[in-house]
Image: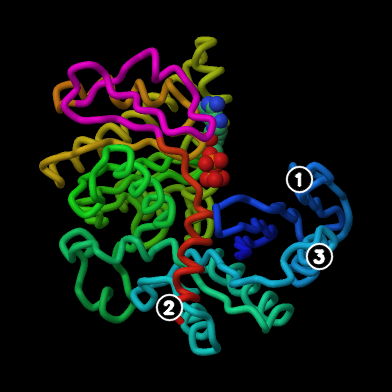
Amino acid sequence: MEVLVLNSGSSSLKHQLFDMTDGRVLASGLVERIGEAESRVVSRTPGADGALVEHTETVAVADHGAALERIVAALADAGLGRDLAGIGHRVVHGGERFVAPTLIDADVIAGIRDQVPLAPLHNPANLAGIEDALALRPDVPQVAVFDTAFHRTLPEHAYRYAIPTTYYEEHGVRRYGFHGTSHAFVAKRAADHLGRDLDTTNLITAHLGNGASITAIEAGRSVDTSMGLTPLEGLVMGTRSGDLDPAVIFHLERVAGLDSDAVDTVLNKQSGLKGLCGDNDLRTVEERAAAGDAEATLALELYAYRIRKYVGAYTAVLGRVDALVFTAGVGENSPVVRGMVVDGLTGLGYGLDATVNDQRAEGRLLDVTGAGAAVRTLVVPTDEELEIAEQTLACVQQG
Ligand code: ADP
């Protein structure tokens, strides 16, 4: 039983094809720089011995529809994707309407379009992927899986901003949260590892990738999360500022002469690690810091300090924490960041085993809890595509 997962960005289209009987990846790939003269097409399909073989091509791919045609043709050449149980689409913003995986029809497409003002960059690209896939494979049930959905359980005191209610009621200005599929996936794996029911487990999950967010999970449900109306709020990220005094925006407009689009670009694309030290890739920042570079050292300290503050805040939100979970590119691969976060939190019961922490997860769950620590610390590799595939299949089977 096969499920195809599509992640359609503004100039890219990623895919993974799963065998849902065992969660195995049958094929995967991506098309980047769609619409440019030289698009890059990467396709991994099974070779003669069944192992995935990667092919890379540089060709012009005009639009998302053409990208999808290539993907489907490559799958067909490998004898795959003909009999799909479902196609799952990652959709960034579900607003208040979409709080669960949803079987796509014309009304759902219109509903996703209604959320575009909340996610002007992401939702149109997600919609393009959906419409192309429906045109190419109208025979296959298609499901939208929303990044915001896991955070539907936020209590109102966590999701409302203290601004006049009319802006919430008229314009949906509230906190929604993102990376929901990842937080949900690692929460399940963490509870399994702890030998507990997720329903009785309290966790703090830190998804640290290019984008980064941290979530307080009480009895398996998201009760607070660091991203807000958009993915800009919260932690320091690769190129996003995370939390700041909103008055910084008026100051940049009135004093530095930026208009609101320019401020948007500064805060989303030129801030975070990149704004502080010129590099947004944490590996490079760590290397520079290790070599004594002052800007990179400050960037790394600010990055870890912000995470530590949130872990402290969410420890207070939850009262009892069963485990702190690190995931995504940085969370899974950076002993340095994990150390900088947890070593400052011994007073709250957190602690690391330095030897285990020095390992890379490389697809495995690592229990990095130190001797005598009251709260467990885990490294849990995330797999957003598999989570989307599982949710897609469940949605299709429920009808
Ligand atoms: P995305 O949000 O694009 O899915 P990822 O989850 O792949 O991002 O995370 C990308 C980040 O992970 C980058 O900042 C990268 O530097 C960081 N990263 C990956 N490997 C390592 C490593 N070995 N050490 C430190 N950081 C790493």
Circles 3 and 2: CB distance less than 8 Å?
Answer: no
Residue 372 in picture, x, y percent from top left: 18, 18
The part of the image, by quadrant, that contains residue 288 is top right
Three-letter amino acid code at the position of disc 3: Ala
Against 398, residue 389 (above or below) is above
Looking at the picture, tell me which residue is in the foreground, 161 or 71.
71
| Residue 116 is covered by the magenta coloring | no
Q: Which residue is mark 3?
A: 76
Three-letter amino acid code at the position of disc 1: Gly
Three-letter amino acid code at the position of disc 2: Gln
Residue 398 in picture, x, y percent from top left: 43, 78
Residue 79 in the figure: left or right of residue 148: right
Residue 323 in the figure: left or right of residue 183: left
Residue 99 in picture, x, y percent from top left: 35, 72
Instruction: Name the residue located 64 percent from the left edge and 62 percent from the top edge.
Output: 10
Q: Which residue is mark 1?
A: 50
3D distance between C-alphas at marks 2 and 1: 32 Å
Q: Which residue is mark 2?
A: 398
SS majority, magenta: loop
> Is the CB of the residue bearing disc 2 within 8 angstroms of ligand 1?
no
Which range of residues does the magenta coloring cover?
A: 350-379
- Classify mark 3: helix, strand or loop: helix
Looking at the picture, tell me which residue is in the foreground, 123 or 254.
123
Instruction: Name the residue located 52 percent from the left edge and 15 percent from the top edge.
Output: 293
Q: Nearer the viewer, mark 3 or mark 1?
A: 1
Residue 380 in the figure: left or right of residue 284: left
| Residue 354 is covered by the magenta coloring | yes
Would residue 382 be visible to someone looking at this image? yes
